[in-house]
């Protein structure tokens, strides 16, 4: 995925060694913002930041360690981000971030969760206090030292009371857990019979999802730590889909049957029937996609024009009585706006694949969020085959095509063909529905 933003979060387990700092700098130098937990440093200066993250990270802030426990460092590149520290708590740093590329502003809280039970309670209370005053799109990352579910630990030894408190806190703040691709756990005790848990995560509120609808979270190599770094890559541009999607409301629109009939009959009947059938489907899908895009654009324009006319009539009504024709026009346009809104909600409902809400009776923002969540869960962030690794949409498509071409081989001539004309299949009128 082509990314507008790359944010890394990593529990480094101490930065007192110069060798550890050098190893980290080779690992994290290509990101916009790095959030490091458990620095075990009571003081951090620019030399420590350069040695640890690289010279490109020319600004930073930190939360000092309590003796040899804890400590958080935030380092960023001023050529891509403007960062202002808003709050330092006992277990967290909260900053306001503005991207210089797209001028989007959001808040980030990086945390290091404590080990002791009484401190964990204070830690969750601190998160609630921060969230209570949060008005910006918000991301919370770091080592929480807590799990949300028993499946997030490799054995059954889970403090369910604290787990439930953590889950309740996340829900009360309306935060979502960003799905982690490729890994189930982020920490290991590095023993032969290893205990593993997902202690590190990224949480986000609905405002963040509106700001960056395409966000991907991957785990990198643990390197010098027993925690794996988490890398969040974000983009505000949705990747273009190469898959044809049939919209359920298309048959309700005028012109649908004509588009299907004309595109289906535009393909010659000569040749291999299966190839002819495939060509007909391809031609019909291409024609419907183009027609659907034009219809959607027209509906958007009609909606804007209708609203503008209604606004003009509303303004006129404040100074004079509307004529009968104007009142009828205003009522007609209000009905059209409602109908157009219903079609848009139906489209979003299909994308979100929610079946238990009646067609046309839904909140479009809710379905945007559901569609984004579904897309994030189903996203394939990388494809690997032999010595090739790809991340962009076009490169992944090319690699997949190359791989399956090798699996299925080349086209061979067939001794027999399927004649669909002799199957006596019933002919259905698409305008009549199923």
Image (cartoon, helix red, strand yellow):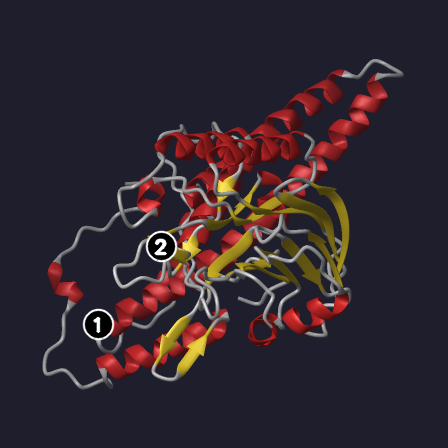
Rendered residue at 39%/55% (across/down): 378
Q: Quadrant of residue 125?
A: top right
The percent position of residue 110, horizontal first and vertical second, equals 61, 48
In the rendered image, which residue does mark 1 sit on? 273
Asked whether disc 2 touches disc 1, contact meaning CB atoms under 8 Å apart, the reply is no
How many callouts does the rendering have? 2
Tell whether 242 sits left or right of 88: left
Instruction: Nearest to the eye among marks 2 and 1: give it.
Output: 2
Dot 2: within a 10 Å radius of its alpha carbon, few (fewer than 14), some, or many (20 or more) residues? some
**Residue 169, relative to residue 297: is it above or below?**
above
Residue nearest the viewer, comparing 410 with 389: 389
Q: Residue furthest front?
A: 67
How far apart, in angstroms, are the residues tagged by discs 2 and 1? 48 Å
Residue nearest the viewer, comparing 108 with 2: 108
Please, what secondary structure does the residue beneath circle 2 have? loop
The percent position of residue 52, horizontal first and vertical second, equals 64, 70
In the rendered image, which residue does mark 2 sit on? 184
**Residue 346, relative to residue 49: is it above or below?**
above
Of the image marks 2 and 1, the number of the one nearer the N terminus: 2
Tell whether 412 sits left or right of 244: left
Dot 1: within a 10 Å radius of its alpha carbon, few (fewer than 14), some, or many (20 or more) residues? some
Rendered residue at 17%/65% (across/down): 420
**Residue 169, relative to residue 253: is it above or below?**
above
Q: Quadrant of residue 308?
A: top right
The percent position of residue 344, horizontal first and vertical second, equals 53, 39
Please, what secondary structure does the residue beneath circle 1 have? helix
């Amino acid at each position: 995925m082509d990314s507008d933003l790359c944010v890394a979060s990593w529990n480094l387990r101490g930065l007192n060694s110069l060798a550890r700092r050098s190893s980290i700098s080779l690992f994290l130098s290509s990101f916009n913002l790095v959030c490091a937990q458990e620095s075990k440093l009571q003081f951090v200066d620019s030399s420590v930041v350069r040695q640890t993250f690289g010279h490109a990270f020319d600004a930073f802030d930190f939360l000092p360690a309590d003796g040899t426990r804890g400590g958080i460092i935030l380092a960023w590149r001023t050529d891509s981000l403007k960062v202002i520290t808003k709050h330092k708590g006992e277990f967290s740093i909260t900053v306001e971030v503005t991207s210089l590329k797209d001028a989007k502003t959001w808040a980030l809280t990086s945390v290091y969760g404590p080990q002791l039970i009484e401190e964990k309670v204070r830690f969750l209370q601190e998160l609630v206090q921060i969230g209570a005053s949060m008005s910006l799109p918000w991301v919370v990352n770091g080592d929480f030292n807590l799990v949300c579910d028993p499946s997030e630990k490799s054995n059954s030894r889970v403090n369910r009371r604290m787990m439930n408190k953590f889950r309740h806190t996340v829900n009360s703040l309306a935060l979502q857990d960003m799905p982690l691709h490729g890994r189930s756990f982020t920490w290991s005790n590095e023993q032969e019979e290893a205990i593993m848990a997902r202690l590190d995560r990224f949480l986000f509120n609905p405002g963040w999802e509106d700001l960056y609808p395409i966000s991907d979270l991957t785990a990198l190599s643990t390197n010098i730590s027993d925690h794996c770094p988490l890398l969040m890559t974000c983009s505000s541009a949705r990747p273009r889909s190469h898959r044809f999607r049939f919209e359920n409301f298309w048959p309700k629109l005028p012109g649908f049957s004509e588009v299907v009939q004309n595109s289906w009959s535009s393909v010659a009947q000569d040749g291999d029937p299966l190839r002819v059938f495939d060509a007909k489907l391809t031609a019909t899908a291409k024609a419907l996609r183009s027609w659907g895009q034009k219809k959607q654009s027209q509906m958007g324009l009609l909606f804007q024009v209708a609203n503008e006319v209604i606004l003009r009539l509303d303004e006129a009504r404040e100074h004079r009585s509307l004529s009968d024709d104007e009142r009828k026009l205003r009522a007609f346009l209000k009905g059209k706006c409602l109908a157009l809104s219903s079609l848009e909600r139906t489209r979003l409902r299909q994308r979100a694949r929610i079946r238990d809400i009646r067609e046309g009776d839904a909140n479009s923002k809710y379905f945007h969020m559901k569609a984004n969540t579904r897309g994030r869960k189903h996203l394939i962030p990388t494809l690997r085959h032999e010595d090739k690794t790809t991340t962009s949409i076009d490169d992944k498509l090319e690699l997949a095509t190359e791989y399956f071409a090798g699996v299925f081989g080349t086209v061979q001539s067939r001794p027999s063909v399927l004649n669909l004309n002799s199957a006596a299949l019933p002919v259905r009128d698409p305008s009549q529905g199923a």
